[in-house]
Amino acid sequence: GDAGKATAGKSWRRFDRTRVCGDGPCSRTTNREAAAFYAVGPPYLINARDAVALARAWLRAMPDVHDQYPFLLAEMYAYSMAAANLSLPHAQVQHLMVSNVQAGGEGWPWVDGHAADVCAGAGRATPPSSTYFDPATPFANDAHPPGPAAPSVLHLCQGYRAGGQHYAKRGVPHTAFSCDAGLFKFDPEPIAEAAAAGGTQVVRHAYMLCNLLPRLQSAQLEYKRTVCARRGVKWNEGETGVMGI
C-alpha cells in the first residue's frame, strides 16, 4: 500500500471527494499539497486541541470512502481526506522508519553502506551493539553519548531472508508465546556473512533480521520466565521455533 507515501496524495484525489468532503478544502486540494502534507495515516504526534475535531471528521469520512474503496487502507485515505478538509497539514518524516527493503523514502540511507555493523554484537536475545539500549540503565545524556544514526522504527510488514534465516509476519506460529514452544531461531554469524558478501538489499534484510529476531527472543524469554514460572510449569528455552512463509 502507499497510504504513507507521496503517491497516496494522488491516490485519494481520485476518489469522489465531493461525496466525502462536500465543498470543503479537501475537494480543492492540489496534487502538490496532497503529496506534501496529506499522504499520511494516523499521526504519531498531534496537538490535543486538534484531536477531537480530526477524529470526528475522520469518522464522518470513513463510510463514503469505504463505499468507494472497500479494501485495506480505506481508513488511511479517509484520514488523509479528513485532515485536508480541516486544513490540518502534516509534517511528514520519512527517514525514521524502515520496512520494505526495495523501497525509497524510508530510513535505509542510515543502514546502507554499513554491512560490517548491521549484526555486530548481536546474539541470543541481544540486538546489535549499535542499536542496543539497556532499559535497566538510568538515562542521562552524559551516560548515553550519541551512537550511530539508525532508524527508530522497524515496520515488520514484509518478509526478510538472509543467511538461511527468515521472518515473515504471516509465518509467526500462534504458539510463539507459550511455555512449550521454543525460541525463534537466530544465528547472527551467517546473516552477517551474507551481508558482507551481498549487495544493498541483502544488507537491509540482514539489518531487519539481526534487530528483530533477538528482540523477539527476548520477549519470549520474558514471557516464559514470568508467566510460565507463575503458573508453576516448565518452559522451553531452546531455539526450536521455525517460521514458514
Image (cartoon, grey):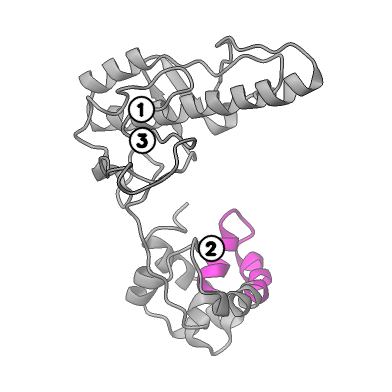
Residue 80 highlighted magenta (yes or no): yes
Sequence order check, earlier mark of 2 and 1? 2
Q: Which residues are magenta?
A: 59-81
Residue 88, image x, y percentages: 47, 79
Contact, mark 2 vs mark 1 (Cβ under 8 Å): no
What's the mark number on residue 128? 1
Q: Residue at x 41, y 30 (%)?
A: 211
In this view, 185 is above or below 50 = above
In the picture of the structure, the residue carrying the numbered disc 3 is 131
Contact, mark 3 vs mark 1 (Cβ under 8 Å): yes
In this view, 29 is above or below 169 = below
Residue type at mark 2 is: Pro
Residue type at mark 3 is: Thr
Judge depth for marks 2 and 1 and give the one in front: 1
**Going by the image, does 115 lie left or right of 126?**
left
Sequence order check, earlier mark of 3 and 2? 2
Q: CA distance from mark 3 to mark 2?
A: 26 Å
Q: Secondary structure at mark 2?
A: loop
- Return the residue nearer the eye: 177 or 222: 222
**Going by the image, does 149 lie left or right of 124?**
left
In the picture of the structure, the residue carrying the numbered disc 2 is 42
Q: Secondary structure at mark 3?
A: loop
